[in-house]
Amino acid sequence: MPPRYFPTRGHLLLCQGQNCQARGARLLHAALWKALERDALAYYKTGGTVRLTESGCLGACAYGPTLCVYRERGGALEQGWYGAVDFPLARRVAQAVQDGADLPAEGRYGPDL
């Protein structure tokens, strides 16, 4: 029997590199995961479509914790890169992914601005 497939609207990658961990990335991941589960946004909950994954270094070491978002929107791959991410910002990004809304501008850098 193959594994169960859970559809998603987007994937959040939260850096767990050494510099990001020194800035609270491990605690941020745990808090965000609990919020996604509690609010039924996690991909395996009924109605939830957001995946959250711990990532290796995302390359913005001096600006951590760093969060990267990938999702399909308008028939194209959209990506969002965030530095100095705190829980409220991470939560807003996750909610925007769930709702199919524009990604927040706060803390965002890189392509697709």
Image (spheres, helix red, strand yellow):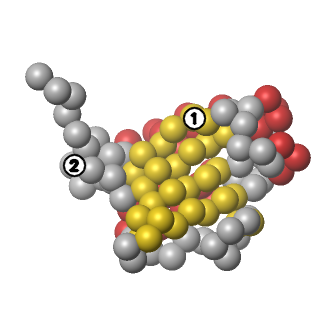
Taking depth in this image into account, of 72 and 62 the one nearest to the observer is 72
Q: Is residue 2 above or below residue 112?
A: above
**Which callout, 1 or 2, points to the residue nearer the camera?**
1
Question: Which residue of the protein is positioned furthest toward the right in this rendering?
Answer: 62
x, y percentage for residue 68?
61, 53
To which quarter of the image does residue 19 belong?
top right
Instruction: Name the element at disc 1.
Output: strand
Taking depth in this image into account, of 105 and 7 the one nearest to the observer is 7
Q: Quadrant of the N terminus?
A: top left
Residue identifier under label 2: 46
| Count of picture labels | 2
How far apart are the alpha carbons under marks 1 and 2? 22 Å
Asked if one can make out residue 22 in the rendered structure from this viewpoint, the answer is yes
Q: Is residue 88 above or below residue 106?
A: above
Amino acid type shown at disc 2: Thr
x, y percentage for residue 38?
38, 45
Q: What residue is at 42 percent from the left and 46 percent from the top?
A: 51
Q: Is residue 78 above or below residue 41?
A: below
Q: Earlier in the sequence, mark 1 or mark 2?
A: 2
Residue identifier under label 1: 54
x, y percentage for residue 30?
55, 34
To which quarter of the image does residue 76 belong?
bottom left
Q: What residue is at 69 percent from the left and 58 percent from the top?
A: 82
Query: In the visual, does 22 lie left or right of 58?
Result: right
Query: In the visual, does 106 lie left or right of 9?
Result: right
x, y percentage for residue 34?
46, 39
Query: In the visual, does 18 lie left or right of 38?
Result: right
Question: Which residue of the protein is positioned furthest toward the top in this rendering?
Answer: 1
Q: What residue is at 74 percent from the left and 32 percent from the top?
A: 17
Amino acid type shown at disc 1: Glu
